[in-house]
Image (spheres, rainbow, N blue to C red):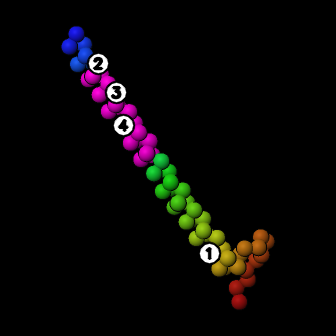
């Protein structure tokens, strides 16, 4: 009976370790996604500012060099 209890405890311990690993992996993936989103948002803002700076915000506007 003691052996059976030890086996059950070991199995539970192993299952808990697996769950923790999965949770850590999910958290890392979420952090990576958030970082990618932030980078994309920053790049998008930079692009918008570049467009505004160049005066190309209005569609169909042609820039003719002086």
Residue 15 image-quadrant placement: top left
The x, y position of residue 5, in whole percent, is 25, 16
Marks 1 and 3 sit apart, C-alpha to C-alpha, by 52 Å
Dot label at residue 20: 4
Residue pictured at 73% horizontal, 80% vertical: 63
Which residue is more in the foreground, 9 or 53?
A: 9
Instruction: Pick the residue in front: 19 or 64.
Output: 19
Select label 3 or label 2 by which is in front. Answer: 2
Indicate which label's residue lies in the foreground, 4 or 2: 2
Front-most of residues 41 and 64: 41
* Magenta stretch prevailing secondary structure: helix
Crowding near the residue tagged with mark 3, few <14, some 14–19, many ≥20 C-alpha atoms within 10 Å: few
Q: Secondary structure at mark 1?
A: helix
Residue 11 lies in the magenta-colored region:
yes
Find disc 2 in the rendering and name its residue: 8
Disc 2 crowd rating (10 Å Cα; few below 14, some 14-19, many 20+) is few
Q: CA distance from mark 1 to mark 4?
A: 45 Å
* Disc with the residue nearer the chain's start (4 vs 2): 2
């Amino acid at each position: 009976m003691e052996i059976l209890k030890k086996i059950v405890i070991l199995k539970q311990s192993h299952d808990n370790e697996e769950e923790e690993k999965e949770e850590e992996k999910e958290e890392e993936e979420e952090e990576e996604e958030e970082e990618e989103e932030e980078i994309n948002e920053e790049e998008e803002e930079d692009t918008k500012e570049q467009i505004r700076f160049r005066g190309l915000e209005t569609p169909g506007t042609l820039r003719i060099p002086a």
